[in-house]
Image (spheres, helix red, strand yellow):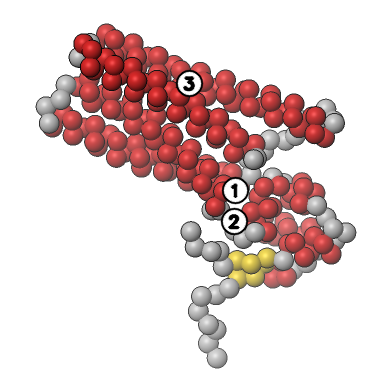
Amino acid sequence: MDKLRIRNNIRKLRFQHDEMTQELLAEKVGVTRQTIIAIESAKYSPSLELAFRIALVFNSPLEEVFSYDSPEKPSQ
Amino acid sequence: MSYQETNITVSLVSNLLILGFYLMNFFRMYQEVSLEPAKVFRLWGIVIVATIVLNILGNILTNIVLSIIHAIKTKTERNEPFIADERDKLIGLKGTRISYIVFSIGVFLSMLTLVIDQPPLVMFSLLIFFSIFAEIIGDISQLYYYRRGV
């Protein structure tokens, strides 16, 4: 299976938010803890709606939580 | 192992048991007295009813056991919401799609038995086999997606 190109900073952001547990984050965004684990370990790309909900929990813009590694280098 | 994975594992085990039971009885009949329609129909009935009943019972038992384990672990009576979120639904859909593909190939292969002059009983028996086999492949693929990512 191809490695996903969507990266995230959820682990870091959880740590910065009083070491929020995966369970609490899962509860806040309405998914299971397993889904948060899968997102953190880049085994699952969340839907746009879930990505926004996660960003809202951390009160951060989406780009700060998720980033995309483009296979093509940006043109100069 | 998550709630969904446990449920799929229970379904996989019950489907494997049913398939084993079906194949064992079918081949015994095939070797002993060739295929007697009445006996084969009875076997199909048992297999179809057993598939439905075992899956429902397995689901209920899994729910009860997991609720008890959760209550013991958290020491509360509050039930854990066994929700199926977007990832569970996606994996479920992918599993169903794979089951459908396997069953379609199975239907095609079953029809081939009519082309090579096998009795219709063989064709229908193969259809039953492929319906359970497709479920098993669907369950395995879902477990794969849970473990390796989707």
Please tell me if label 3 and label 2 are on a single chain.
no
Q: Is residue B98 left or right of residue B67?
A: left
Please tell me if label 2 and label 1 are on a single chain.
no
Q: Residue furthest top?
A: B38
Q: Are marks 2 and 1 in contact (CB under 8 Å)?
A: yes
How far apart are the two marked residues, 3 and 2, measured between alpha carbons?
32 Å
Q: Are marks 1 and 3 in contact (CB under 8 Å)?
A: no
Tell me residue B13's x, y (percent): 50, 29
Q: Amino acid at mark 2?
A: Tyr
Q: Residue at x 24, y 37 (%)?
A: B108
Q: Residue at x 57, y 24 (%)?
A: B58
Q: Nearer the viewer, residue B146 or A74?
A: B146
* Chain at numbered mark 2: A
Image quadrant holding the N terminus of chain B, namely: top right
- Does the image show residue B34? yes
Q: Is residue A15 left or right of residue A9?
A: right
Is residue A20 placed above or below B34 in the rendered structure? below
Is residue A66 placed above or below B18 in the rendered structure? below
Q: Residue at x 68, y 65 (%)?
A: A8
How far apart are the two marked residues, 2 and 1, measured between alpha carbons?
8 Å
Determine which residue is flagged by label 1.
B87
Determine which residue is flagged by label 3.
B52
* SS category of the residue bearing label 1: helix
Q: Amino acid at mark 3?
A: Ile
User: Can you tell which quarter of the image residue B133 is in?
Assistant: top left
Determine which residue is flagged by label 2.
A44
Q: Is residue B97 left or right of residue B59?
A: left
Tell me residue B86's x, y (percent): 61, 47
* SS category of the residue bearing label 2: loop
